[in-house]
């Protein structure tokens, strides 16, 4: 989703962005975060069938920093 307009962009046509998003819990969080990944079907702002990436993150007793 875009930050400014809150429109759904989706991930199916943005391979580079998807790879960057999937790396965030490992590359930018210390210690790394266990993440469950789910792709939820949607229709994007251009009317195409697409998916939204949902990251499920359980509570942790540790403090994580980025």
Image: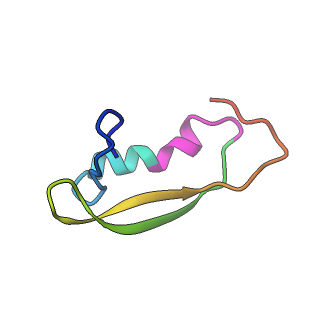
Q: Quadrant of the C terminus?
A: top right
Dominant secondary structure of the magenta stretch? helix
Query: Would residue 55 be counted in the magenta stretch?
Result: no
Residue 2 in the image, given as x and y percentages of width and height: 32, 40
Quadrant of residue 49 in the image? bottom left
Residue at the location (36% across, 35% down)?
3
Query: Would residue 23 be counted in the magenta stretch?
Result: yes
Residue at the location (42% across, 58% down)?
53
Residue 41 in the image, given as x and y percentages of width and height: 34, 70
Residue range of the region highlighted in magenta in the rendering:
22-31
In the image, 36 versus 6, the foreground residue is 6
Q: Is residue 4 above or below residue 35?
A: above
What is the residue that sits farthest to the front in this orientation?
5
Quadrant of residue 17 in the image? top left
Residue 43 in the image, given as x and y percentages of width and height: 25, 64
Q: Is residue 53 above or below residue 20?
A: below
Q: Is residue 22 left or right of residue 15?
A: right
Quadrant of residue 27 in the image? top right
Q: Is residue 63 above or below residue 45?
A: above
| Display coloring | rainbow
Residue at the location (68% across, 30% down)?
65
Residue at the location (78% across, 36% down)?
63
Q: Is residue 60 above or below residue 37?
A: above
Q: Is residue 1 left or right of residue 28?
A: left
């Amino acid at each position: 989703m875009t930050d400014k307009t809150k429109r759904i962009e989706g991930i199916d046509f943005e391979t580079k962005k998807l790879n960057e998003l999937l790396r965030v819990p490992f590359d930018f969080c210390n210690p790394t975060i266990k993440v469950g990944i789910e792709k939820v079907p949607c229709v994007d702002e251009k009317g195409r069938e697409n998916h939204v990436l949902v990251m499920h993150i359980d509570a942790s007793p540790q403090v994580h920093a980025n």
